[in-house]
Image (spheres, helix red, strand yellow):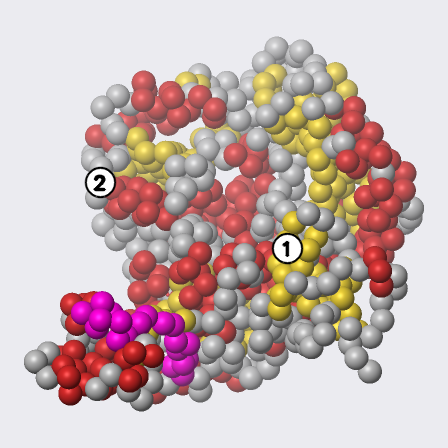
Amino acid sequence: MTLGFAEIALPVPMRGHFDYLLPEGMVPCIGARVLVPFGRRQLVGIVMRCKSASDMPTDKLRAVDTLLDEESVVSQLFLDWLSWASQYYQHPLGDILFTALPVNLRKGLTQDALQKAWQLTDKGQQFDPQDLKRAAKQQALLIALKPGPQLHQTLSEHYSAAIFRALEEKDLIEATNLAVKAKLDWPEHISLAEQPRPNLEQSLAISAIAHQNETFRCFLLEGVTGSGKTEVYLQAIEPLLRQGKQVLILVPEIGLTPQTVRRFQLRFGLDVGILHSGLTDNERMQVWRQARSGELGIVIGTRSAIFTPMKNPGMIIVDEEHDGSYKQQDGWRYHARDMAVVRARLENIPLLLGSATPSLESLNNALTDKYQHLLLRQRAGQAKPVQHQLLDLKGQQLEYGLAQGMRNRIQAHLQQGNQVMLFINRRGYAPALICHQCGFVEECRRCDRSYTLHRGMNKLQCHHCGDAKHIPHSCQQCGASSMQPVGLGTEQLEQGIASLFPGYPAARIDSDSARGKQKLHQLLEDINQGNYQLLIGTQILAKGHHFPNVSLVVILDVDGALFSADYRAAEKLAQLITQVAGRAGRAHIQGELWLQTHHPSHPLLQDLLNNGYQHFARLALKERRFAALPPFSYQALFRAESNHAAQAHDFLLQVRQLLSPGPEMAAIGPIPALMEKRQGRYRMQLLLQSTLRTGIQQQLNRLMPQIEKLPLANKVRWSLDMDPQDFT
Ligand code: ADP
Ligand code: ZN
């Protein structure tokens, strides 16, 4: 039976595969790339299946133009993995496959490693080298090429560029390309650098991992900053590397510094493959190829490095697993940590998640024994712990969001020549309404949650039940007419700093100013050189960097997180505070961390400051359980944007009407997004929540095709986000 048809996955925003005819004699393997006609274009596609018949009439089918690969670019295991993702994230597989491939492969370029080489021309084959007696070097090169082509790299050790040119001009040799053989002997070249003796907790962690490093198992390594987590990674992977097994390490976007990479290089004396957004397509391709052929023992990269294939996988490590940069925020909205869990299970290898401030999701998995919990409670270094303090904002005169006492403190630290770090908490963007005199917060009576202020609609709205009301002019509790949105002034802070502290140079670090690896690197370098004394930043500053000269950290807007409609805001704030406290200051400078709040006695704040993140996180988990919020329920978020508010709203309303809500699934909305208008577009959301993952999945499987057919689906910009992390 001939397999004359192929199902091809294409990078188009449509579900399902496309049938094509296979020309006589073309036998592609599964996962190979082909060029196919699509409309008036030609696209690169991936062969999912070959078959003997198609449901489509044969005369309607077009034929595959070209087979690009002898060997597949996507393994069967990756196809299974990504097909799972397509189902789970309700996203077209074609788009997922192409997201997972390096750009060069998406464009149809070759997957083979080719290197410049030289060979004899026909004339060169006939030529007698004796005739070149007076040019000994040229003669030697001709003789060297007699047996066949050779790599330029090897030849150039013996022959200068002039020799090649001379023979090329005589038409005796010509340039060509040769495939290079993978060098797989790196395990023999491991040379272990000196390493510290692990302390007791580290030893326990290392041996727990060593006991189960042959099969799938998830570990959560929860260790305070500086407790030696990286040291545990290093010692845990050593036995695997010695067996020739490869290790993939994910780090947050901003955590991939030369220091991190160097630590792994130096420990084992091996080349480390590095993957981040600053690479060229060719550099990226090279790491992909070397990892797949087994040439690299260690690959370190940011989010999308999770798609790096490994010939002989040994372990995946996700460092700072709580970090928000692991979640893709547009297109296919995958979470690299969650993708890592599924991949490790399919590859049957261990997965090691590490963090000083684990996400509540992972912590819950550890506390319920789904993951093995490894704890490091002591700091390995000797930096003094940072002192935490609260500043009560009630009734204070604020300038650019800073109370008088705080401004004085900042001045004092600057005068001593130290650095001061100011945090603006953008997660608390959509503010609650708070009374500046007494701290009263407008709350929804049904949900005991603060209302969210929507200026555009001139309304307060509850993001938990959708209830809305007018904005009150005075405080219900004390009668003062000083109701104001929390977080006021943060926007102006950046401009205000210069006038408040003239003469002290300030650096702003956020995702805009830190774009591009070089730029960020330079900025961090300048900061540690002391070129700036004031550092203004968002969460991004709390990731993986040490700021030894910072003696004062101020978080301006704690209330924004305490009363945010985003239930993750408190968790993120606690992670920020803990991470910053762990990185500022060093042995001889006593660091201070100040939080400005109208609610100094808020239980979450008190718990965090008195008992630390580990205690806080366990308490926060209890609250989540009580409120049936993730990880005790599952969420999917529909977003819609339009220039016409009514269209975005109506689209989501129609989606809602298609749902069949039951006791196991709630639908909240449509309500405005936290940031209800951006770039002139109105933004609405519809949140699905269920205590059963399958509850949401089943409905979506049934509904997505219907939703895509809604007339408004083509008029508004809409998307679906599984396990949403961000509600702005
Ligand atoms: P983390 O990854 O938890 O922030 P690191 O592994 O970077 O911690 O360790 C912090 C510092 O302590 C590093 O300088 C590291 O070399 C050192 N360190 C880690 N473990 C030990 C140990 N057992 N003995 C001595 N120093 C250690
Ligand atoms: Zn409510």
Q: Quadrant of the N terminus?
A: bottom right
Query: Residue at the spot x=67%, y=22% of the render?
Result: 454
* Closest to the observer, 125 or 390: 125
Magenta highlight on residue 167: yes
Crowding at dot 1, Cα within 10 Å, few <14 / some 14-19 / many 20+, comes out as some
Quadrant assignment, res 287: bottom left
Looking at the picture, tell me which residue is in the foreground, 158 or 421: 158
Residue shown at the point (63%, 23%) measured from the top left:
680
Amino acid type for the residue under numbered disc 1:
Leu
Ligand 1 picture quarter: bottom left
Q: Secondary structure at mark 1?
A: strand
Question: How far from the left and from the top, in percent, is residue 132?
Answer: 14, 81
CA–CA distance in space, label 2 to label 1:
52 Å
Residue beneath disc 1: 43
Q: Is mark 1 within 8 Å of ligand 1?
A: no
Q: Which residues are magenta?
A: 166-184
Residue 13, percent from left and from top: 71, 49
Residue corresponding to mark 2:
530
Quarter occupied by the C terminus: top right
Q: Residue furthest left?
A: 134
Q: Residue at x 74, y 32 (%)?
A: 716
The mark that comes first in sequence, 2 or 1, is 1
Q: Is residue 426 above or below residue 613?
A: above
Nearer the observer, disc 2 or disc 1?
1
For residue 727, side relative to residue 199 (left or right):
right
Most foreground residue, 404 or 579: 579
Specify whether residue 248 is painted magenta: no
In the rendered structure, the answer to whether residue 479 lies left or right of residue 189 reads right
Report the number of numbered marks. 2
Residue at position x 61%, y 27% in the image: 678
